[in-house]
Each structure stands twice: as structure tokens, then as C-alpha cells.
Amino acid sequence: MKLIKEIKEQKELIQTQGRIIKKRDLGKIFFLELSDFTGSIQVVVEKPELLTKLQDLHPETIISLSALVKKSPSDKPELHAQSLEIISAVEEVPDLELQSKEIKENLDTQLKHRAIGLRHKKNKAIFKVQAKILEAYREFMTNLGCTEIFTPLLLASSSEGGAEIFHVDYFEKQATLAQSAQLYKQIMVGVFDRVFGLSKCFRAELSNTRRHLTEGSQLEFEFGYIEGLETILKHEEAALRHILKKVYKDCQVEMQTLKAQELMVPKETFPTYSFKEACQVLTEKFNIDTLEWDDLSTEAEKLLCQYARETYKSDFIFITHIPKGAFYAFRDDNGIIHNVDLLCKEMEISSGGRRIDDYDQLRMSIMAAGMDPKDFSEYLSIFKFGMPAHGGFGLGLERLTMLICNQDNIRQTTLFPSDPKRVASQQL
Ligand code: ATP
Ligand code: MG
């Protein structure tokens, strides 16, 4: 059996198999587009006994055939079927149109039939790009000396505090689903110094926006012996540059299919503004009152991205020292928090920062956030046994995919999205 990309002109019959993508019926002759994961090829079927076999079959049918290879009028190899076997027959029309150039159905309908809809060329392009992002991230982090880790998703108590926690029945007891890998990746810095991973995060937020899921994936990074916040910014920027370079080199066809323009990356380092400086820009350029703010609004994120594009020709901008910080965020002697958000094109795609590395400070910070240090005893214990200055970030994989692939809804860049109305793409 030959893969489609291996098919070249030759004298002997070849055997191949694949999925019929398109069928053109001209009466005494059928043209099929046959595809496998390596590409697609035109098949000409003229023999009457083969035509009868195909008569009532629809695209998506799986066939195997033996054929002669000839040159098509467009100079590409073309198959002329000599014998043909139906391996999996499709006798009905799917609920979604898979052959159309653009996806025609609305998002609700697409998600209702997600299992089939993912076969559309555009959807395949999105998830090919996503896989490339992951490949590039893993490559970059491994080269940096980071060890890949997988952190638990079932937890006894919450990882970040707050109300956005899913509870699950756990035999006679209750467990929660991880909101992030935060505490575990810090624990693992105590083991390996430098770690990374892909982690799931569950957020029980009633956010029906185009950028929130209840089950998301984050590219995680945590790094020991940092010199300061700059170390995190440096590695985050380099990781993103590496991802974009690889995607734009290896996924040209997919980017064209998606009509996605390359994100703008400045020649110099990504523009970096402190929260205070960002607020000044918002006030001076956009006439926004930021006086009471401790975090950026969605609208402010969009405007700052616009500003970065106009001023620095950059789709990326770092905002540092944001007053609203998690309990584990490092504060300096002036009470300034050493954290950072990365904005891209129009929204936040990652949050990170230096972490508290002092046992007593961390214990107090947990209490100040209204939580009980006892619930964090395993995590807290590492700070009694030597922890270097450390920090990292969590970067939303689906949001990054959405921006690279020029999609306007995060559900389009999640295989089986969960949100307040659906679980794994199915409406509740
Ligand atoms: P936002 O303010 O946009 O809701 P967040 O600050 O609550 O995000 P973090 O806890 O900082 O999110 O998570 C780090 C990254 O993970 C975010 O920058 C984002 O890219 C991604 N992320 C967080 N929450 C979600 C979610 N509900 N759905 C999809 N991605 C998410
Ligand atoms: Mg954040």
C-alpha cells in the first residue's frame, strides 16, 4: 500500500487507500479526490463495474484500489482505477458541509456535530497549527534545559483560591478540579530547577465570552534562580518568537487556508510597560479614567494592543507590575508586585511573574487572601527546605491558537470546547 505522497508515475499497478473527499459524477466517468494524511490525488474511474460500486456512495467513504498512475492535464500524478474495494461505505449526507471552501454553518451547529466538523479543511488547518505550536514550545523549552512535567488535575483543595472552582464527588468525599498548575510547577522547580508542561485548567466562571472556556489548556513554564522579572520576560518572548518562526515556516499551507496574516513581531524586544505607564497611555491617548484601577479591563487591553501596533509595529505588549496579584505573587519592599501579563493583538494571552519564595511571607499571604495555610501544607513545606528565586508564566494555548489562526472565537480553536452551556462541545 502506498501513501498518497509516495505515488509517482510508473508502469506497474499501485495499491493505495484513503478517504473520498469529493466525487464528480459525469455519467460514464467519475472523478474522485482521494486523500490520506499525506495529501490528496485525483482518481479517474471509468470501468462500468467500478462505477456501479460507487454509484450511491457519498464523500467520506473509505476505499482501497489498485490503479495505474498517469500524468493529469495539470501535470500531476493521477490514478486510473483498475479495481476498487469499499472499506467503509457512507450512504448518507453529513449534517455539515465538509467540501465547502468556507465553513457555512453557525458555531452552534458546528459544535453540535463537532466529531464530523473537525474534518473540514479549515478545522484541520487550525489543529495542525496548534500541534505545531506545541511541538515548537516543547523544542524551545527542552533546549532551555527545562524538564517536562504533568501536574495533577484532581486536587483535594483549590489551587488558586476564589470562587471559580469545580467540585467533584470523590467517593464519599469532595475533590476539586485544578484551576492551574501553579502550585505543582513551583514544587517541581524545587526538584528540577527548570520545568515546563502543558496543563489543563478548569474555571467555573459564568463567562460567555469569545475568549473564555471552562476547560482550557495552558503552556506552563517555571524557572529557578531568576535574576528578576526580566528573566521571565526574556524567556517568554524568546519562546513566542520560536513558536511563530516554526509555525510560519512549517504551516504555510494551513495559514493560507485560514487566510491568517502573520502576527507582527518587532525587531527590538517586545514593548514593555508597567501598569502605571499603561494607565498613563490610556488616560493621555484614549481619555480613560484609570484612577481606581488595580487591573486592566478588556477594553483597555484592546486599546493597549492598538497602541503597541501603531507605536512599535508589534502585536505583543508586556504589562508589568499589576496591582492585583495572586497570593503567591512576589511583592518588593515598596509593595510593588513583580508580575506580568502578555497582551497579543487584542487580549491577554498569558500571566506570569516572580513568586514569593519565603515561607513566612507566603503563609501570611495565604491568610491575607482568606485561606487556611493548612490546606496548602504540602506546597508550603518546600519553602522550609530551600527554594531559589523563581517565577514563570501560564500561556493560554487556545487563545494563542486563535490569534495565530485569525479566528474570532476560542471555541473554534478547542477540539471539544466546554463553556457554561456545553461540555466537550455537547449542549447540556
Ligand atoms: P482573564 O482575565 O482573561 O479571564 P485570567 O487572568 O483569569 O484571564 P490566568 O489565570 O492569568 O487567566 O491564566 C493564564 C492564561 O490562561 C490567560 O492569560 C489565558 O490565556 C488562559 N486562560 C485563563 N483562563 C482561561 C479561560 N477561562 N479560558 C481560556 N483561556 C484561559
Ligand atoms: Mg491573568
Image (tube, helix red, strand yellow):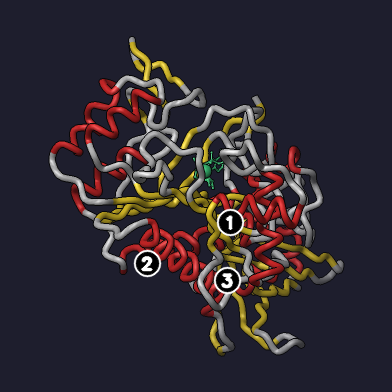
| Residue 295 to residue 43: above or below | above
Residue that mark 3 sits on: 251
Identify the disc placed on residue 401.
Answer: 1
| Residue 67 to residue 363: above or below | below
Position of 242 with respect to 226 (left or right) is right
Q: Residue at x 35, y 63 (%)?
A: 141
Q: Nearer the viewer, mark 3 or mark 2?
A: 2
| Residue 291 to residue 303: above or below | above
- Closer to the camera, 261 or 65? 261
Q: Residue at x 20, y 53 (%)?
A: 192
| Amino acid type of the residue that numbered disc 3 sits on in the rendered structure | Cys
x, y percent for residue 129: 56, 62
Position of 371 with respect to 424 (left or right) is left
Q: Considering the image in quadrants, where does the C terminus appear?
A: top right
Cα–Cα span, label 3 and label 2: 16 Å
x, y percent for residue 25: 83, 65
Position of 108 with respect to 168 (left or right) is right
User: Callout 1: helix, strand or loop?
Assistant: helix
- Closer to the camera, 131 or 320? 320
Residue that mark 2 sits on: 139
Q: Residue furthest right?
A: 27
Q: Residue furthest top?
A: 172
